[in-house]
Image: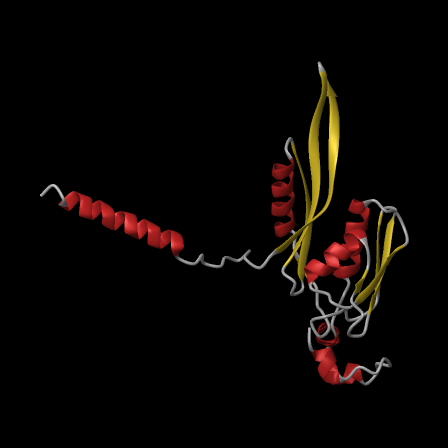
Amino acid sequence: MAHQPQRGGGGNDRNRRDNRNAPAVDGPDSDIVEKLVHINRVAATVKGGRRFSFAALMVVGDGKGRVGFGHGKAREVPEAIRKATEEAKKTMIKVPLRENRTLHHDGSGRWGAGKIMMRAAPPGTGVIAGGPMRAVLETLGVQDVVGKSTGSSNPYNMIRATFEALKVQSSPRMVASKRGKKVADLMGRRNDGASAPEAVEG
């Protein structure tokens, strides 16, 4: 009789071990890529000295056309990163990609003193961009693109300028839908040699 409760307890232990070894269920954020772009130490002068805190700038994306950015501030670095990541996930935008590898057309963006330009590139080019712009394009899922910053090197301005350029990206399907025409009609007017099946993607 004294061994029966022990067998029951052992069964519960086995169940707990099974639950620990069971594969985790993929959630909506399981495929999100996170990149720390910039972290800054901020000092506030208070009575008795200075109080230090940290500000983090994060970029997140799924590598499939969705990307977002956010910034967070806290007394500790991990907490600042966590806040920035949560904000970035809430502000993600959808960007159409051509052949799931590059932009549909050239674009430029400006925010404050930050100015950037981006150009679609042929296969094999890679991501030719630096700093914060590169982090945004890589997490977005762009594989071939040429980017250039012609303004301020402030990471916050560069990030916002890059998002301004991405927000105006449009695919032939989106343009055709707005104009009430077919994609093939628009493709007949293109001069870059792209074929209609390529333009339909994205």
Q: Residue furthest right?
A: 150
The answer, for residue 182, to whether it is visible in the render is: no
Scheme of image coloration: secondary structure
User: In the picture provided, is 197 more to the left or to the right than 111?
Assistant: left
Which residue is most to the front? 3
Occupied quadrant, residue 38 = top right
Q: Residue at x 86, y 47 (%)?
A: 153
The structure residue drawn at horizontal position 74% and vertical position 33%, both measured from the top left corner, is: 41
Classify 51 as above or below 40. above
Q: Is residue 67 above or below residue 185?
A: above
* Residue 48 vs residue 12, the one in the foreground: 12
Q: Position of residue 93 (x, y in %)?
A: 67, 58
Where, by quadrant of the figure, is residue 118 drawn?
bottom right
Q: Measured from the top left, where is residue 125 in percent x and y?
A: 80, 70
Does any portion of residue 66 appear in the rendered image?
A: yes
Task: Locate residue 128: give its quadrant.
Answer: bottom right
Q: How many marks?
A: 0
| For residue 107, side relative to residue 7 (left or right) | right
Residue pushed farthest left?
1
Image coords of residue 126 (percent x, y): 78, 67
On-image quarter of the C terminus: bottom right
Residue at 9% from the left image edge and 43% from the top image edge: 1
Camera-side residue of 107 and 38: 38
In the rendered image, the vertical position of residue 11 relative to residue 124, given as above or below: above
Residue 64, image x, y percentages: 65, 65
The extreme top residue here reads: 48
Q: Nearer the viewer, residue 47 or 161?
A: 47
